[in-house]
Each structure stands twice: as structure tokens, then as C-alpha cells.
Image: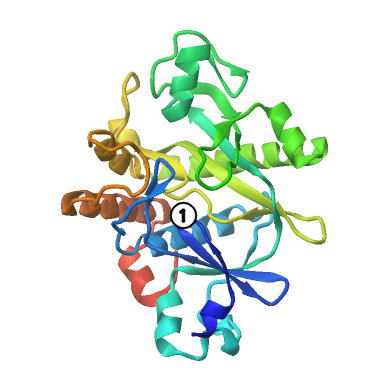
Amino acid sequence: MALASAFVRSGKVRDLYAVGDDRLLLVASDRLSAFDVILPTPIADKGRILTGLSRFWFRETADIVANHLLSTDPADLPAELTGGDAAVLAGLRGRMMLGRRAEVLPVECVVRGYVSGSGWKDYRARGAICGVALPAGLRESDRLPEPIFTPAWKAPAGAHDENIAFERVVELVGDAGLAARVRDASLALYARGAAVCERAGIILADTKFEFGVAPDGELLLIDEAMTPDSSRFWDAAAYEPGRAQASYDKQFVRDWLEAQPWAKTAPGPDLPDDVVAGTRARYVEAYERITGASFARYLSEDVIA
């Protein structure tokens, strides 16, 4: 197949293909990773959910920072890439993004509005997250006085990402001005996302962004944006600080995995049917509540609200 000849690499979820010298095709699979391990059981339509939500957010935040997205239409791909194969084109619908190439910055740009997950662990140990001192007496899942930028170093494959202070971001990026732009864009993106989610009755507890620099020097938001894979979404109606929250993200899978006799190394355990179904249902609900659109319509027509 022609597509295989353009293959660049596979990430935990997405497969990347070169389209000429200046574009990349990102295809979101149904793979699910947890604790940096790709699990053996796929979640049906997960790749399309992630792509649909990312498309929505790229549209909603284009005034804050430019993004890499050029097209989501398989017909825009060169014929030599797909071979004109109808099955290939159908398989790409709803799960592809044709984007601008960029030099990826080696930083996970995490923004937290609430203290949870690894941030909660850091806070209990040090009273701070990524060097950002926080008030004493916070409970798990408490809302922070204001959102904070808590970046992580993107570790090589096989290693865990490492929470870092902003000073380390400057070192990794190599430009204090660029590091500040990335931080400020991340905070602005989170604020926009949190406001949109709030109107849908969802709390955006935290999320992470990736950025790249285009050949012309333009800063681009790349990869995905505010999906259940990269965010913690909580139901505002059920929110109760002082404990972990029910979520619309893969925390549901993480909780199941934590209860298994598994050392968090590959290969991961097979997921039972109820966990697969529950995960898909949570992802679909997040898509529909945030976008206000039908996921069934997205599957059939490849359009978002």
C-alpha cells in the first residue's frame, strides 16, 4: 500500500506519515495507553473521538495561537499516497489530520486548574507542583486559586515524563522568550477550554498541550487538544473536593489497572468488555457534551458542530 511507503513513526496513539517535505498526516488509532504502556485492547472509535474533539478545539482557539491543522478531508491527500483505494480513504475519514510540519518542542505543556493526579502527589510531598508553591491545606481535587503552568519533560520512549520547573523549560527550549510564549499560550488555551467546558457542565481539571515551531518561526499548537487522552474532565454536577472524581477520560481505565496484579510494564493486561464499553461511553459523552454535536453524525458525515 502506498501509505506504508510514507510512514514516519508510530506514537502511543497516532501514526505519522510524510506528505511531501512540509506536511504530515496524523492518523489517530484506537489504541489506548496507560502508565506509558500501550494496552493490547483497542477502544472502538477512540481515534475518531480524539480527532473530532481536536478539530473542535483547533477551531475554537485559533485566535489564541495558530495550529498545525490544514485539512481533515482524505480527498486532499495526494493520490500516490492513498492509491485511490476506497477502503483506505474510508478508514481515514474522521481520524486523520493533515498538518504543517514543525520542530516539536521537547516539553509537555500541562496546565492545572485543580490539584489532582501527579499534581496531588507532588503537593502532598512538597506543598508545590513543578516548583509552584501552593497554599497549605488544599484537599485532593480542590480548585486552585488560579490555573498554573506545570510542564513536564518529554522523556524518550520507554521512560516516564518528568515534571519540571519553568527554568528547565527555558533550558530545553533554548529561548526564554519562546518559553514564555508557550507558557502564556498554554494558560490562555486552558482558560478558553475551561470556559467552554463549564457551559457544558464539565470541569476541565487539567490538560496538556504540545507545541512546535514552523520553518518560518511561527509557534504552532500541534498533535491534539483537550481530549480525554490529554485531559481530566469531571462532571460538574458530581464534583466533590476531598476525593478523586469520576471522570470522562482514561482515569476509568487507570483505576481498573491499579487494582490488577500488573507491574505497569509491557505488555499490559487485556481489558474486560465492561471496561472497554465504559471507556468508550465516557469518551463519547465528553465529545457530545463539549461540542454540542452528535457523535453518530460525526461517524456518518465527518462533520462537527
Instruction: Identify which residue, 91 or 257, lies in the foreground.
Output: 257
| 69 vs 198: above or below | below
Residue 185: x and y, percent?
Answer: 67, 42
Instruction: Identify which residue, 114 or 164, lies in the foreground.
Output: 164
Instruction: Identify which residue, 303 or 95, lies in the foreground.
Output: 95
Residue on which the image places disc 1: 12
Can you say which quadrant of the picture contains the C terminus?
A: bottom left
Neighbourhood count class around disc 1 (C-alpha, 10 Å): few under 14, some 14–19, many 20 upward: some
The number of numbered badges drawn on the structure is 1
| 252 vs 33: above or below | above
SS state under label 1: loop
| 83 vs 47: above or below | below
Residue located at (28% from left, 34% from top): 258
Residue 102: x and y, percent?
Answer: 71, 59
Amino acid beneath label 1? Lys
Going by the image, does 304 lie left or right of 17?
Answer: left
Residue 115: x and y, percent?
Answer: 46, 24
Q: Residue furthest top?
A: 136
Going by the image, does 45 lie left or right of 193?
Answer: left
| 210 vs 161: above or below | below
Residue located at (69% from left, 37% from top): 184
Dividing the picture into quadrants, the one containing residue 205 is top left
Residue located at (48% from left, 25% from top): 119
Instruction: Identify which residue, 248 or 4, lies in the foreground.
Output: 4
- Tell me, what colour scheme is on the image? rainbow
Residue 55: x and y, percent?
Answer: 52, 61
Going by the image, does 109 lie left or right of 167?
Answer: left
Residue located at (44% from left, 21% from top): 121
